[in-house]
Amino acid sequence: MNKKKLSVILSFYNEQENIKNSAEKLSLVLDSITDIDYEIIYVNDCSTDNSLNLLKEENLKNHNIKIINLSRRFGHMAGIMAGLRNCRGDAAGYIDIDLQDP
């Protein structure tokens, strides 16, 4: 039986201070749910800080992390839509990169 897949989408701009923490915490929680597969989709809304490089480092540690790098600033909602259009999960959800959603 194939496992269902969950897609978690995070759209961000200049969030270098939150990349490592969000990747580690989400991976830890999702790895603990053994009856699903998952992907974590980070949508970079053309950040000008070191966010993309840090995210590439996290991708090397966890290949369930996917990166969408937008060519220019499109805004928060367009980033979410890019994630939804490119996700492969049976279900998808959005969470803020600072993990402050309830």
Image: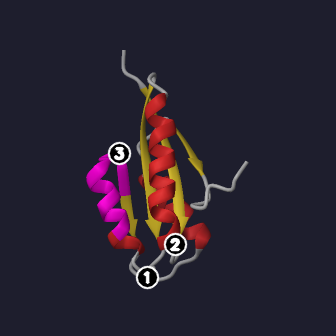
Name the kind of residue labelled 1 in the image.
Asp
Q: First in sequence: mark 2 or mark 3?
A: 2
Magenta stretch: give its range.
54-66
- The picture places residue 50, in percent across and down from the top left corner, at 39, 78
Q: Quadrant of the N terminus?
A: top left
Q: Tag on residue 64?
A: 3
* Mark 1: secondary structure: loop
**Can residue 63 be found in the magenta stretch?**
yes
- Of residues 73 and 28, the one drawn nearer to the viewer in this rendering: 28
- The picture places residue 25, in percent across and down from the top left corner, at 51, 47
Read off the residue under disc 2.
15
Q: Few, some or many C-alpha atoms within 10 Å of disc 1 (few <14, some 14-19, many ≥20)?
A: few
Q: Would you place residue 13 above or below residue 21 in this image?
A: below
Alpha-carbon span between mark 2 and mark 3: 20 Å
Residue most extreme to the right: 102
Whether pointer 2 and pointer 1 mark residues with C-beta atoms closer than 8 Å, the reply is yes
